[in-house]
Image (cartoon, rainbow, N blue to C red):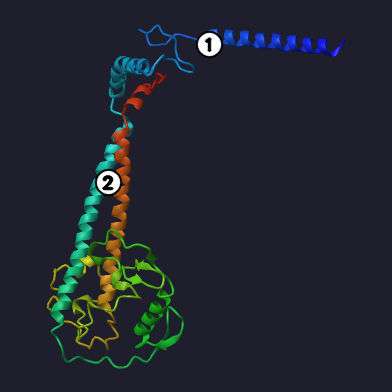
Amino acid sequence: MNGSERNRKQFLVRHHLSRTNARRRQLHTQVDSRQCIEPDCVKPAREDSKYCSDECGVKLAKLRLIMLLPEKVQQYYKDQPQSELHSLEELRSIDQKIGQIQIQTETMLGYVRAIERYVTAMKSTTSVSYDDPGDVDFMVHCTVCGMETTGRQLPKHVERCFVRSEKQTSFGTATPASFNPDNLFCEAYNKANNTYCKRVRVICAEHYKGELENELQVCAYPKAWSAGKSLTFAEMFEHGPDLLKDQGFCCAPRKDCVQHHRWIQALVGTIECERMNLLTRLDELLERRKTVSVGCSTRGDVISLLNFVPPVFANAK
């Protein structure tokens, strides 16, 4: 067999294979072609689709909704879903808690305002005779650094140690707070690291300079709070702005009073920390309320109704 005959046979084989493949593709196309499933349409469907056009698909979808949706709605709302009842009950509970926290926050803010008015009124008191308690000569150890010091110097020593340790840590963010009610946070700008301080303003060891009590000449600690027992905020402020309760106040010079060292900053700082905790809890409740509300709004939508299957309960034996 010469080369020309060999080439001719190869050509015939390739031609036969190509015609066979073409017939198979044509047969496959004829088998796969089908009519558009829209009831009133007789056109063939597009490739990889059940419809001949988008209009037929939309028309059939509307027809499904008209036929199926009313029955699904009746089945779904025949008995109010337990999930919806639970969500509504949770929303009522969250709203009650939000109202309580808002009242508590305003109460805490009222305590701070009462202290500010009291301090302002006491600034006019300059010199009052008082009984010097005498030197305190016992030795104690600092709770911060462990160093031994006298009982008289202990409050100031602990304060200096606390301030020194606090300055070693940065509590800041790159941007100021978008919500800072009644100057709760310090927000002082730190040029060293370009941040805004996020400590509670009144107890910020790095930036608070005692603006509230600096002009006081005397200690002015109300003696009504020196009953020898722990008092709640409600008990301390039960008479409103009248913190003295006709029992007087500490007449020692503010800078020399060891027993009530920086009591105004400590008290206001404690109240502000409690207010911050309330605002944090309020933010959590608002976020939870948003989540539950979104769930309620999406429950019972068209997709959920169409996919809803009434539960079947077995007969109790």
Q: In the rendered image, which quarter contains the N terminus?
A: top right
Q: Secondary structure at mark 1?
A: helix
**Disc marking residue 160:** none
Q: Nearer the viewer, residue 20 or 271?
A: 20
Q: Is residue 10 above or below residue 141?
A: above
Q: Residue at the spot x=28%, y=80% of the render?
A: 262
- Amino acid identity at mark 2: Ile
Q: Nearer the viewer, residue 194 or 135?
A: 194
Q: Secondary structure at mark 2?
A: helix
Rendering quarter of residue 56: top left
Q: Nearer the viewer, residue 113 or 244?
A: 113
Q: Is residue 43 above or below residue 236?
A: above
Q: Residues within 10 Å of mark 1 (few under 14, many from 20)?
A: few
As measured in the structure, the alpha-carbon distance from the residue carrying label 1 to the one carrying label 2 is 58 Å
Mark sitting earlier along the chain (1/2): 1
**Disc marking residue 32:** 1
- The residue at which mark 2 appears reads as 94
